[in-house]
Amino acid sequence: MTSDKHFRAVAIKPSISSPILDARDIIISSDRALDENAPAVVIFTSGTTGAPKGAVMRRAFIFDCALEVADHYQLDQDDVVLHVLPVHHATGVGINFFPSLVSGSRIEFRSGGFDEKQMWERWKQGATDPRKRLTIFSGVPTIYMRMRRYYQNKLRKLPADGIAKYVAGARQFRACLCGTSALPQPLNDFWKSIMQKPILQRYGATEFGAIFKMRLGDNDVPEGSVGEIASGVDVRLSEGDEGEVLVKSPHMFSKYLRDPEGTARAHDPDGYFRSGDIARRDGKYYYIIGRASLDIIKSGGYKISALDVERELLSLPYVAEAMVVGVPDEEYGQRVAALISLQEGEMPTGLLRMNSGAKHVLTIDALRRDLRERLAGYKLPTLLRIADGELPKTATGKVQKKILGPRYFPADHHELPKVQKWVARSTLAKL
């Protein structure tokens, strides 16, 4: 129950320098068409590889893109969208907000920081009370990871009838979406077993929106794929079937705010936007390999996808989160370095060693041994650091490798006791 005592009226002073228009001076004309290429909204990028940039979006982005997304996910007035993402971000506004508005769907906002316990409780309410039902949920890998952890640590310890109510909450949705970064396959497998349907993954960027599609009920999309090219979008890979993703889209941004040089650098000579992401194509399906500047590690003459290594790390039951980066090395060019957080209560004692006589820690030898059947030898991490708690992230749930890599694996990392280094052991032949 709430009452007047829970609220307080606050006078807000004018905060704009322009004079306020009188309503009598505003004319709305049904005969005058607005320029769909004129600036409409500025959405800032997430700043994964540097400072956030203001992407100026055209009017067509707001309406046409919203209609396309609404049609793709078959949104209508019977849908209830649970909105937990920042509305200043491309996903929060372009995927969750505008499409719901144009389709007449109801939007339920959750304020404050994300709380996995509260989210599970809200899901359960939707399954037990028809007035609080939910049909669409959109998250990021961090959200799905935290909710899985809460389920494993808390909910699965409940009696069977108690667990069933929460599982029913997860199964009420017509669709659950995931964006901003790839959903690790082990995490996707967990939710598929709970929801009895896969989470629909999106790939896109603030500058051009979502360019690949995975339709509701499409069970033919291979594991790890972001789907096929969306209609009306022109996508090239710089090296044929593998390379940088180059994009032309009807929903492209018009420019970076007050940055004409940056806008020019972001396009190739043919006018394609240079995404900076590396992908490969297999038939009609596309797979994201990683960020060209961050996720491609050059070690000992090999090119290694950091995302491939992260995916296999996350398949280990005792790894909750993983970040893999290349660390400069005189011998190899770069070393494969892994920063991980451990899954509570999932560490086999055989993988642990005593640290300072008190604390058990995972050894890099044990980790490499578990990965050996999953990864080629040259892809195995040679540097390991265990994070205390969850990995730091942006407001949109992204791990900023450009910042965290040097922070956890600095130039003097060999002097840090928290960084474990694997050294190849050579065996001399017996005479």
Image (tube, helix red, strand yellow):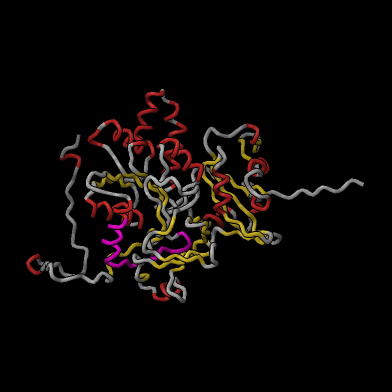
397 left or right, relative to 2:
right
Decide: is 39 above or below 283.
below
Residue positioned 29% across, 35% down in the render:
126
Q: Can you tell which quarter of the image residue 130 is in?
A: top left
**Residue stretch in magenta:** 48-68
Position in image of residue 147 (x %, y %): 42, 39
Residue positioned 74% across, 50% down in the render:
424
Position in image of residue 140 (x %, y %): 41, 48
Position in image of residue 144 (x %, y %): 42, 43
Q: Is residue 67 magenta?
A: yes
- Viewer can see residue 419: no
Position in image of residue 136 (x %, y %): 32, 44
Q: Can you tell which quarter of the image residue 263 is in?
A: bottom left
Q: Can you tell which quarter of the image residue 55 is in?
A: bottom left
Decide: is 37 above or below 152.
below
Viewer-side residue, 234 vs 336: 234
310 left or right, relative to 79:
right
Residue positioned 23% across, 55% down in the render:
102
Q: Which quadrant does the N terminus fall into?
A: top left
Residue positioned 30% across, 44% down in the render:
82
